Image: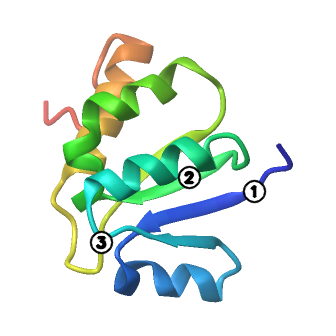
C-alpha cells in the first residue's frame, strides 16, 4: 500500500472529494458498498464511507478494526450527520483508553 485514500458513498456526497484528489467510488446501497470495501481494502490505506452506508454495515466494518490498514472512517453524507461517526469514535476511544475523554459531559 502506498498511502492511497478512497471514499465510498452516494454520487452527490463524494464528488467534492474527487476534486481534492481522493479516489471516489459511488455506491447506491449497502451491498455495493460492502463489495467495494472488500476490493478497496487491498489497495487503500484510508477509506472514508458515508454514514448512510456505514451504519447498516457496522458488523462488517468491525473486521477492519483488527488490522492497522485500511483505516475506515465514517463521515457525514451530503444529507448531514446522523451522529454515527461520532458514536463510532466515542466507542473506539473508550475501548482504547477505558474512559470517555472526548464526550464526557461531567
Q: Is 66 situated left or right of 9 in this image?
A: right
Tell me how far mark 1 sits from mark 2, CA to CA: 9 Å
Tags 2 and 3 touching, CB below 8 Å: no
Disc 1 target residue: 4
* Mark linked to residue 47: 2
Tell me how far mark 2 sits from mark 3, CA to CA: 14 Å
Task: Please identify the quarter of the rendering in which residue 96 is found.
Answer: top left
User: Is 40 drawn above or below residue 101 in the view shown?
Assistant: below
Question: From this viewpoint, is residue 71 visible?
Answer: yes
Q: Secondary structure at mark 3?
A: loop
Q: Quadrant of the N terminus?
A: top right
Residue 46 in the image, given as x and y percentages of width and height:
63, 49
Residue 84 in the image, given as x and y percentages of width and height:
22, 49
Q: Give the mark, 1 or 2, whose residue is nearer the N terminus.
A: 1
* Mark linked to residue 77: 3
Q: Give the mark, 1 or 3, whose residue is nearer the N terminus.
A: 1
Question: From this viewpoint, is residue 102 visible?
Answer: no
User: Is 19 drawn above or below residue 69 in the view shown?
Assistant: below
Q: Secondary structure at mark 1?
A: loop
Amino acid at each position: 500500500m502506498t498511502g492511497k485514500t478512497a471514499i465510498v458513498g452516494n454520487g452527490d456526497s463524494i464528488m467534492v472529494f474527487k476534486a481534492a484528489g481522493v479516489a471516489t467510488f459511488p455506491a447506491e446501497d449497502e451491498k455495493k458498498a460492502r463489495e467495494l470495501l472488500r476490493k478497496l481494502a487491498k489497495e487503500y490505506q484510508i477509506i472514508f464511507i458515508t454514514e448512510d452506508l456505514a451504519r447498516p454495515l457496522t458488523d462488517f466494518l468491525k473486521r477492519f478494526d483488527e488490522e492497522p490498514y485500511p483505516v475506515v472512517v465514517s463521515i457525514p453524507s451530503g444529507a448531514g450527520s446522523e451522529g454515527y461517526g461520532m458514536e463510532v469514535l466515542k466507542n473506539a476511544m473508550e475501548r482504547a483508553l477505558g474512559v470517555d475523554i472526548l464526550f464526557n459531559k461531567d
